[in-house]
Image (spheres, rainbow, N blue to C red):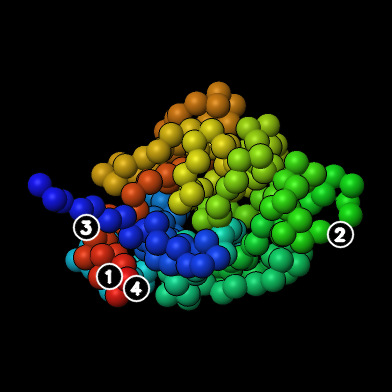
Amino acid sequence: KNISMIDYELLKDSKGKRLIGFGRYAGIVGAYNGLLTYGLKTGRYKLKSAHLCENKEKMEDELKYLNFTDEKIIVTGKGRVGYGILETLQKAKIKEVSKEDFIKKTFKSAVFVHLDTIDYNTRFDEASSNKYDFYKYPELYKSNFMRFAKHADIFIAGHYYSPGSPFLFTRDDVRSEDFKINVIADISCDIDGPVASTIRISHIDSPIYGYNPITEREDNFLKDNVIAVMAVSNLPSELPKDASEDFGENL
């Protein structure tokens, strides 16, 4: 019938870099869902689900109900997703701190640290490195994510994972007493991959499940010592009008 279908997300520039995508809204909604999950996990506050909000503005209005004390949040990802996450955290008036301060200092309000690939990967031989070396020789690296995980309450994962790279943390790591994270919003959503607690995707109408580090199985996320996991794989669909308009404007 002479129908043409064009996948605009595959458009790339002359260097092979993708030009447009829905990543920004995945980050915006994923970070919001992470904050929503923490409220339910702790019983400290409740936010309306993003897909029940009329638009992005109404969703952001919900952030006034946040009730934090001194929580620490890890954010990974420096692409569209990562910077979408930052948009939500900035709207929530959560302060960004340096890697050193995140590890060494305590705060009287919620803070977050924004990590790049080389911040949580180090060479086995302890030689100096950069992310381009890591991309080329991932087998020479190991994760040192645990130096942040032992100080964090929430992890919002917006990184890109390349097969062959080290996992951020393993199931053994999660069982460790040093692992303090109790809420994970895994926007990247690689099943049985770099984020060990992500054992399946979740869905917009039921976005949260629990990961029990002892049994390595799904459990009630409200239980103590069970990690609350948000792993929705189609997050922009929670704000379809906003996400579509943003994509169209970029196109």
Query: Would residue 183 appear left or right of 54 to someone viewing this image?
Result: right
Q: Secondary structure at mark 2?
A: loop
Which structural element holds mark 3? helix
Q: Amino acid at mark 1?
A: Gly
Real-space CA distance between mark 3 and mark 1, rounded to the nearest whole angstrom: 23 Å
**Disc 4 target residue:** 250
Quadrant where the C terminus sits is bottom left
Mark 4 and mark 3 lie on one chain; the one further toward the N terminus is 3
Residue 193 position (above or below residue 8): above
Q: Position of residue 194 (x, y in %)?
A: 60, 41
Give the label, 1 or 2, closer to the camera: 1
| Image marks 1 and 2: residues in contact by CB distance under 8 Å | no
Q: Residues within 10 Å of mark 4 (few under 14, many from 20)?
A: few
Spot occupied by residue 91 in the image (x, y as percentages of width and height) = 42, 75
Give the residue drawn at x 37%, y 58%. 9
**Residue 53 place in picture, x, y as percent:** 23, 63
- The Cα–Cα distance between marks 4 and 3, rounded to whole angstroms, is 25 Å
The answer to whether residue 49 shows anywhere in this view is no
Instruction: Read off the residue under disc 3.
Output: 52
Amino acid type, residue under disc 3 in the picture: Leu
Q: Residues within 10 Å of mark 3 (few under 14, many from 20)?
A: few
